[in-house]
Image (cartoon, rainbow, N blue to C red):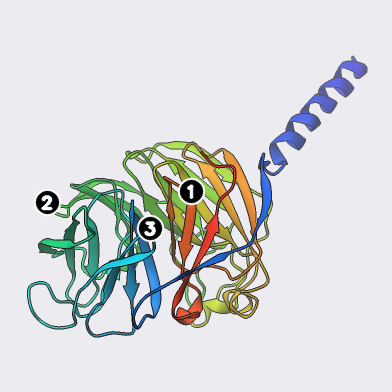
Amino acid sequence: MRMCHFILALCCGSVVSCRSADPVFPREETLTPELMPLQGVTYPLKVEVKHPFLILQNLKQRDSLFHVYDLRNGELKSAFGITGDGPEDFVLPCLLHTPLRDILIEDLNTSKIYRFGISGEGKPAFKGAQRMNYTENVLDPAFINDSLFVIDARYYVSTPALHLLSLTDEQPRKTLTYRKPDRGNSLNPDRAEVYASESRIVLISIYRKRIDFMDTDFHRIQRVEFEYDPPSFINREDPGEAKMSYIYTYLGKRYLYAVFSGVSMKEHKAASTRGTFLEVFDLDGNPVARYLLNGKSPVFFAVDEETFTLYGAGYDGDPEDYLLVYTLKGLS
């Protein structure tokens, strides 16, 4: 009987050991960036890919706020967007990542979502703007399709929850409370960012090395979690001092691409040219590849999943007239 107990204990220990092991990436590589030259006066920040075009948000102008490049030859095809008060003008624009073919731009000052089509020649076509009456000043709404989007309610109410909203009436269709509220001057280490595509909602932690893959009804498909010690205190007044996990993410139609830091934002910025890890997962949460970026770390970035090429901007628009380009080897 004692031998049975001993064997059972060994088996249980093996199961625990297996479950506690970090997920394994079947492919690991070191990547060196190339530089994509830009045309005109530029200060690149946010980028989006609508293959074969790349859309760049340019922060240095009051006009030509957005540039459209042909990725097949690097040619600037068009520039559009001005600062003003006209029906197509912007005050504080923010280019959105979406699975839609159209270009979506949020104006953080006017609470409007602008929609532009893009022609085969890379020319924008204004399709209209919708004012967000109830969910105003929401940063980066995560669009699932033309009618549904997801937001993290921490931006406008005290209870942190994900809301699946209809674009028609901005009313919640579903709600998921995923963590406790912040307390006093301390931010909760379970804080996360939400991303969405036509088939997935992904909640990716900022201070823990954890990613939840869900369907578009908030049903969890898989939680990916690595051994990682989150900060015990995150100062609301200076969160840049706290150790972070995933700092920048892009959700494509094929994969999730997440830049892992493991240091504070201040340390990361200071060491942004010393290499950062890009982790790639399929949409069911299975690790696919882990790349050491042997060059500048991209801030906001997008991936062209036709060629599996990452395009990103560095910190503070540096370098001003180039984009960082990483070819993601082994993806298909």
Q: Report helix, strand or loop for mark 2.
A: loop
Q: How far apart are marks 2 and 3 (CA)?
A: 34 Å
Q: Is residue 156 something one can see in this rendering?
A: no
Residue at (32, 38) in percent of width and height: 217
Residue type pointed to by label 1: Phe
Say which label, 1 or 3, has the lower sequence index.
Answer: 3
Residue 280 makes an appearance in the image? yes
Task: Please tell me how many numbered marks the rendered image carries.
Answer: 3
User: Could you tell me residue 108's position as x and y percent?
Assistant: 24, 74
Q: What element carries label 1?
A: loop
Left/right of residue 209 with respect to residue 321 in the rendered view:
right
Q: Indicate whether 296 appears above or below 121.
A: below
Marking on residue 308:
1
What is the CA distance from the residue labelled 1 to the residue labelled 3? 12 Å
Tell me what residue is drawn at x 83 percent, y 27 percent: 9
Q: Which residue lies furthest to the left in this view?
A: 87
Q: Which of marks 1 and 3 is in front?
A: 3
Residue, disc 2: 168
- Measure the alpha-carbon separation of dots 2 and 1: 34 Å
Q: Which of 38 and 183 is in front in this view?
A: 38
Mark earlier in primary sequence (2, 3): 3
Residue 120 in percent (x, y) is at 21, 52
Classify mark 3: helix, strand or loop.
loop
Residue 71: which disc? 3
Q: Which residue is drawn at 36% across and 76% down?
A: 39
Q: Crowding at label 2, few (<14), some or many (≥20) Cα neighbours within 10 Å? A: few
Residue in the foreground of this view, choosing between 148 and 218? 148
Which one is nearer the viewer's eye here, 241 or 267? 267
Image quadrant where residue 199 sits: top left
